Image (cartoon, rainbow, N blue to C red):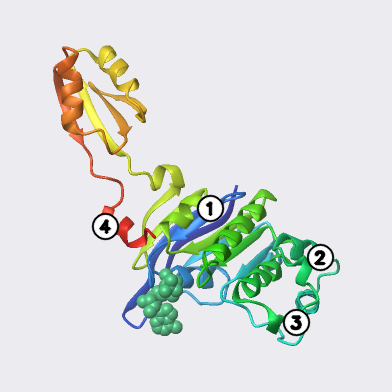
């Protein structure tokens, strides 16, 4: 069931295309990463689906219209480090948020526990480290127990421990069955935290789908030989080879990076097979782009 469906979303700032005809679907229960380098339109996309930024064209629909326009209470968001009252405690700050959101049973202790801030619950916000402030922001997004959480670069500016802690918290939230949509410019982060990904560059969608399928370095290969059953046996025995699918008189399959045209030729030759067809397809994403977002 789609939690969010975006259709042809477009937003220009003057002649800058921040988001360009973006179409996406996010299903319930996934951790959906929006991956792209700085300035690729992630924040603009999140701002649009939250109703903070008005797109030039395109539409988005939350929960298949289930909440009849009243869906905002089911969406918690952390876009940038929020402004809390510096002299009030973590608990007091969350109570104020619950009051503004008109939430009767805000379960503040539960959310402080979730973000590892129970011990500092009565400390004033101004005494918090940057990482603690960020985690309180996550707790604030959880107030009201929304179905969907939106996080914009939640680990930005944190040290390695803080990064690991926030990633772990995001996964904990996912473990509660929530749908999470998070922007990141770090490929490694998306690989570690997300189940699904959309890759955007200059406002354009390059690819979207399951993380394992989209971000792997595997290449697609087409290969055919006179003796197809024997060829299949040989391919299936290669480590890391997957999705062997018959297509006309050859197979289409995914191979890990160490499998090359030369190694496939040799495999066939050594086993007395003559290849009738061999095409190594380019990777699904430009490796150059992956380099930009790696690390
Ligand atoms: P970052 O990771 O750096 O935040 P992003 O992927 O979130 O980047 P956006 O912030 O959505 O990208 O920006 C997309 C493009 O739109 C950029 O070229 C940016 O300069 C431009 N842009 C965003 N907001 C505005 C604005 N209010 N006025 C003018 N241009 C803007």
Please identify, in this view, whether the residue under mark 2 or under mark 3 is nearer the observer: 3
Residue drawn where x is 17% and y is 16% of the image: 270
Q: Above or below — where is 64 with respect to 202?
A: above
Q: Nearer the viewer, residue 180 or 172?
A: 172
Circle on res. 109: 2
Of mark 1 and mark 3, the one earlier in the sequence is 3
Spatial separation of the CA atoms under disc 1 and disc 2: 25 Å
Residue drawn where x is 64% and y is 58% of the image: 169
Residue drawn where x is 27% and y is 53% of the image: 287
**Residue 263 percent coordinates (x, y):** 19, 28
Q: Which residue is mark 1?
A: 193
For mark 2, give the secondary structure: helix
**Residue 264 percent coordinates (x, y):** 20, 26
Spatial separation of the CA atoms under disc 4 and disc 2: 45 Å
Spatial separation of the CA atoms under disc 1 and disc 4: 22 Å
Q: Which residue is mark 3?
A: 124
**Furthest-bottom residue in view?**
87
Q: Which residue is mark 4?
A: 288
Q: Is residue 166 visible?
A: yes
The answer to whether 203 appears left or right of 89 in the picture is left
For mark 3, give the secondary structure: loop
The answer to whether 72 appears left or right of 185 in the picture is right
Q: Is residue 56 visible?
A: no
Judge: label 2 CB < 8 Å from ligand 1. Answer: no
């Amino acid at each position: 069931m789609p939690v969010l469906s975006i259709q042809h979303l477009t937003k220009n700032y003057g002649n800058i295309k921040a988001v360009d005809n973006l179409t996406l679907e996010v299903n319930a229960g996934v951790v959906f990463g929006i991956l792209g380098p700085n300035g690729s339109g992630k924040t603009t996309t999140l701002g649009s689906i939250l109703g903070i930024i008005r797109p030039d064209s395109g539409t988005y629909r939350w929960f298949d219209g289930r909440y009849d326009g009243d869906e905002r209470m089911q969406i918690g968001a952390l876009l940038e480090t929020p402004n809390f009252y510096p002299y009030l405690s973590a608990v007091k700050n969350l109570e104020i948020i619950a009051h503004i959101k008109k939430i009767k049973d805000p379960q503040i202790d539960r959310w402080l526990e979730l973000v590892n801030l129970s011990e500092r619950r009565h400390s004033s916000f101004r005494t918090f480290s940057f990482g603690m402030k960020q985690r309180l922001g996550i707790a604030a997004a959880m107030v009201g127990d929304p179905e969907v959480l939106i996080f914009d670069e939640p680990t930005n500016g944190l040290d390695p421990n803080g990064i690991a802690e926030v990633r772990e918290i995001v996964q904990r939230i996912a473990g509660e069955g929530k749908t999470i949509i998070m922007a990141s410019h770090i490929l490694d982060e998306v690989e570690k935290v997300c189940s699904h990904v959309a890759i955007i560059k200059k406002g354009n969608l390059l690819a979207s789908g399951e993380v394992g399928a989209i971000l792997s370095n595997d290449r697609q290969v087409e290969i055919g030989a006179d003796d197809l059953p024997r060829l299949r046996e040989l391919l299936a025995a290669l480590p890391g080879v997957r999705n062997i699918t018959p297509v006309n008189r050859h197979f289409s399959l995914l191979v890990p990076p160490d499998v090359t045209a030369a190694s496939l030729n040799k495999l066939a030759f050594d086993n007395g097979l003559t290849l009738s067809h061999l095409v190594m397809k380019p990777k699904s994403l430009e490796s150059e782009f992956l380099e930009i977002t790696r690390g």
